Image: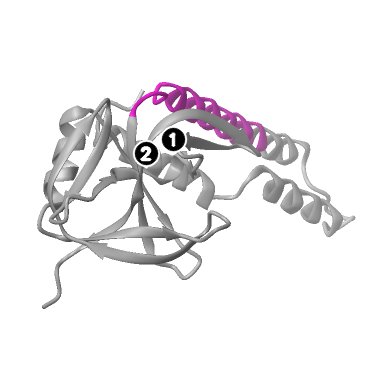
Amino acid sequence: MFNNVTEVSASRELGKSIQNNLGKDDFIKLLVTQLKYQDPLNPMEDRDFIAQTAQFSALEQMQNLYSVNQLQQATGLIGRHVKAEVYTTSGLPETVYGQVMGIRSTNGQTYLVLDGGREVKADDLVAALDENGIRNELEAMLGKAVYLRVYGTDGEVIDLRQVIPVDYQIHEGTPYLITTSGEKIPLSEVWGVGDISG
């Protein structure tokens, strides 16, 4: 289970390391290509073939172990608030806050299902937040330019609007930012935070 930012960061780095290396499908393609184009007068030695097969087996086991570990850690996050960073189609980083309501695993990728229905990859998780962590996030936003999602009639994000929070509260477990006009904004609506340009 993720207890702090260090564990989340280490888990993300392991996942990226595994994903950046050759996958099992790539390994099989290389092996088949090697067998297809080998010199018939000098075929691959049995021991070489066995060594490559053992490497493939080890790679597959490591990927399966990583997937199981990620799934177990994600299960431990159910009910907790999290912070993730995802990239939009334009390449901009988006901060996502929410409470984990469930998990979903598809094609070896684990997704956290957040309140409000939003899903983020477990690999995109930055931190699991306890109550102090939530308070720290909220306090860091006070007096800053906070960008909120604006939704269209179909539920898609169509724009961002800027507010400047002056206070916050946690009501029945849900964190809110409060603006000068008294507007109460759920933390899950925050898209990002920046400095006030002036």
Quarter where residue 11 is shown: top left
Q: Which residue is mark 1?
A: 115
Image position, residue 184 (x, y; %): 24, 46
Image position, residue 76 (x, y; %): 41, 21
180 relative to 44, above or below: below
* The magenta stretch spans residue 68: yes
Residue closest to the far bottom: 198
Is disc 1 placed on a helix, strand or loop?
A: loop
Residue closest to the far right: 40
Residue 7 or residue 50, whichever sits in front: 7
Residue closest to the far front: 181
Residue count near mark 2 (Cα–Cα under 10 Å), binned few <14, some 14–19, many ≥20: many
Counting residues from the start of the chain, the first of labels 2 and 1 encountered is 2
* The magenta stretch spans residue 26: no
Please give left or right for residue 56 compared with residue 114 in the image.
Answer: right
Please give left or right for residue 53 compared with residue 169 in the image.
Answer: right
Residue 192 or residue 37, whichever sits in front: 192
Q: Residue at x 27, y 27 (%)?
A: 173
Q: CA distance from mark 2 to mark 1?
A: 6 Å
Q: Residue at x 46, y 39 (%)?
A: 116
Q: Residue at x 74, y 40 (%)?
A: 49
Residue count near mark 1 (Cα–Cα under 10 Å), binned few <14, some 14–19, many ≥20: some
Looking at the rendered image, the quarter that the C terminus falls into is: bottom left
Dominant secondary structure of the residues highlighted in magenta in the image: helix
Q: Tag on residue 163?
A: none
- Inspect the image, locate mark 2, and give the three-letter code of the amino acid beneath it: Gly
Q: State which region is magenta.
A: 55-80
Cβ–Cβ below 8 Å for labels 2 and 1?
Answer: yes
Q: Tag on residue 98?
A: 2
Q: Residue at x 86, y 55 (%)?
A: 36
